[in-house]
Image (cartoon, rainbow, N blue to C red):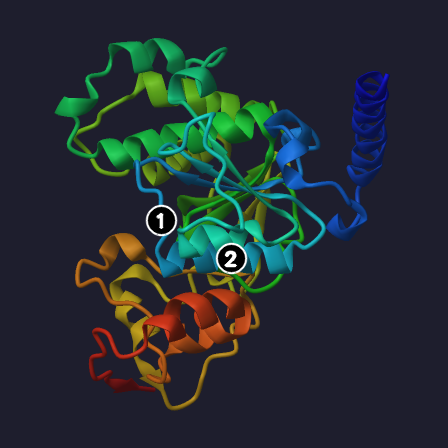
Amino acid sequence: MLKEIQIVLWFFFVFVFAIFYKLSLQPGCIFSCMPIAKQFLTQEDIMSQSRSIIFVETTDRLEPPPLVSCSVESAARIYHDRPVVFFMKGLNNSTWLDSNSTYAAFSLLSAMKNVFIFPFQMETLFQETPLLPWYHKVNATQEKHWVHISSDASRLALIWKYGGIYMDTDVISIRPIPVANFLAAEASKVSSNGVFGFPHHHWFIWDCLKDFVRKYNGRIWGNQGPILMTRRLRALCNLTNFHNVEDQSCQNISFLHPQRFYPIPYPAWRQYYKVWKRSPDFNNSYALHLWNFMNKERKTAVAGSNTLVENLYKTYCPTTYKDLVQGTEGSGHTQQNKTE
């Protein structure tokens, strides 16, 4: 009899949890109103409202470095009422890494109420999109830029299926993005694909998926990413040079000024790792792209260096700074150059 009571109570618990969770999906609900353990939430539960902030790791790496951790943490803090979802290829469906994980970054990220870490398989993700036949045909071992190509494909498929905002894992959020349908300009008439947002099943993303396959050329870096986004946007809009700090709009898509995410352009990426006499305020920015692809020197935030990146960590991802930067103080410290 006791066993039957336990079974009934278990089903009752699951039923009550489902009700609370459905209520928590209402726009504006803070994640503190969701009292049940995150392990009970499925990917479909989390992604169903097209409100997620999405990050993707397409290598098999399981321990996010400090910059990745900072990107996810900063998004979780800025978008505290939205789910922040980190998809990792290296995980599998039987793996659950939580706040007790031996991986420091997973431990701190999993402790955040609105951060969810899920495994993903590209073949499953690409189903019911134009990418699946391409994925079956392409030979990943022969592709020089496969990590970037697979990431470009995955972000398009995720936004197509679920909607929300995609961000690269070297983007530090500093204030909420106030628009829903947007691309981020890297320069006048040039789009990036490091940050973009659309509702699920948006026609522009479907056009990008078709273009990805139709004009696929893995030999050219960026052809499936920023070049593709720029190509599709130019096909729709008569792009002009930006004036002042004003965004552009075309076909109900906002094309956001380079200052919104790229106030420090890629040729000057080292400025993030230098000491500034006067710290920039970034008042016109929503997030900062740190151009980690350019960082072949493996520069990172160093505790006590007073570099711009260290101060960004302190402000926007303080837990990452405390656990992953201060926790490794004294290792690899190099003298930083001063800049205006």
Answer whether residue 223 is visible to the viewer in this image: no
Residue holding disc 2 = 108
Answer whether residue 287 is visible to the viewer in this image: yes
- 81, 119: nearer the viewer: 119
Residue at screen point 29% across, 21% down? 215
**Residue lying farthest bottom?**
277
Q: Secondary structure at mark 1?
A: loop
**Considering only order in the chain, which callout, 1 or 2, is on the residue closer to the N terminus?**
1
Q: Is residue 298 above or below residue 79?
A: below
Kind of residue indicated by mark 1: Glu
Residue 199 found in image quarter: top right
Q: Which mark is residue 159?
A: none
Q: How many marks?
A: 2
Position of residue 38 measured from the top left corner of the image (x, y, whole percent): 65, 40
Between marks 2 and 1, how big is the CA–CA gap? 12 Å
Residue holding disc 1 = 63
Q: Residues within 10 Å of mark 2 (few under 14, many from 20)?
A: many
Q: Is residue 195 left or right of residue 179?
A: left
Q: Is residue 199 above or below residue 241?
A: above
- 180, 41: nearer the viewer: 41
Residue at screen point 27% across, 70% down? 270
State the quadrant of the N terminus.
top right
Kind of residue indicated by mark 2: Leu
Residue at screen point 68% across, 46% down? 82
Q: Is residue 84 left or right of residue 147?
A: right
Position of residue 75 measured from the top left corner of the image (x, y, whole percent): 56, 55
Q: Is residue 152 left or right of residue 182?
A: left
- 14, 332: nearer the viewer: 14
Q: Secondary structure at mark 2?
A: helix
Q: Is residue 337 above or below residue 319?
A: below
Position of residue 191 measured from the top left corner of the image (x, y, whole percent): 41, 45
